[in-house]
Amino acid sequence: MSSPDAVLDGRDLHYAYLGRFTALDGVSLSVRRGEKVALLGANGCGKSTLLKLLDGLLFADSGELCAFGQPVTEDHLEDEQFSRGFRSRVGFIFQNSDAQVFSPTVREEIAFGPLNMGLDADVARQRVDDTLAMLDITGLADRAPYQLSGGEKKRVAIASVLVMNPEVLLFDEPTAALDPRTQQWLIDLVVELNRAGKTIVLATHDLDRLDVLADRCLVFSEDHRIVADGAPASILGDHDLMAATNLASPSRFRARTTTSEVVEQA
């Protein structure tokens, strides 16, 4: 089922919460190694649900999902060998860092993954030290999560994933609720990680920086389907699509057109 160059490949994925509230209605996607793919759409359209399926936190009611050429199912993830391999290769950074950061100290939080994956204690300690230094949070190592600012928690949440050195990184609204400086730091980090070979899939409403965050965009409609797949410039330039998927109001485009006309006349 999986295409040869795809690290993630989903076909006709359906999911409904409690069996009644549709979140995904026949979603198909293929993510190639080294891509930066943005998931776009209005709130509640299914972006976060798809990320959870890609991370094996939820399982489709129907359809098929493969990662690295292997089916991702609940039964397979109950197999310890498969689970360890998958969890070490795919990392998920939640929108709300409080849902991800739970250990008594930052150092323990970052060490949690390596130790639970069976790494030697000395190897895990070195990985933690290297990750703390890479994200410039060594000074936070012995602090408790409740003592951290929102931006610091986000760095710790990212560190707890990067310490595993995953091949694929999933971000849910990475710049939401962050101050401008931290937003820019995170965007620069996403670009740097991608240049280092990481495959990135992110859900975002940050349209102003979409050309930096993504090579390709998948656009969800409000009926929980993917209705467009294209480069950021192509998607943003399709005013009818943007309005129809509630990503921008028609008045926004009218305002831009009016401004452009004024500039040209001047």
Image (tube, helix red, strand yellow):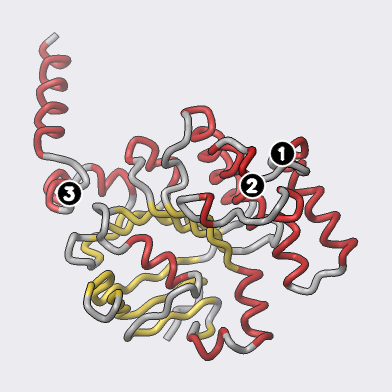
Residue 239: percent from the left, percent from the top? 15, 43
Asked whether residue 78 appears in the rendered view, the answer is yes
Q: CA distance from mark 1 to mark 2?
A: 8 Å
Between residue 195 and residue 109, name the one nearer to us: 109
Side of 12 relative to 105 (left or right):
left
CB under 8 Å between discs 1 and 3: no
Q: CA distance from mark 3 to mark 2?
A: 33 Å
Q: Earlier in the sequence, mark 1 or mark 3?
A: 1
In this picture, is 209 found above or below 165?
A: above
Residue at 64% x, 38% y is 147
Which residue, given by chain and number where applicable, does mark 1 sit on?
A: 137
In this picture, is 85 found above or below 217?
A: below
Label annotation for residue 246 = 3
Residue 187: percent from the left, percent from the top? 51, 39
Q: Earlier in the sequence, mark 1 or mark 2?
A: 1
Residue 175: percent from the left, percent from the top? 45, 41
Q: CA distance from mark 1 to mark 3?
A: 38 Å
Label 2's element? helix
Between residue 61 and residue 108, name the one nearer to us: 108
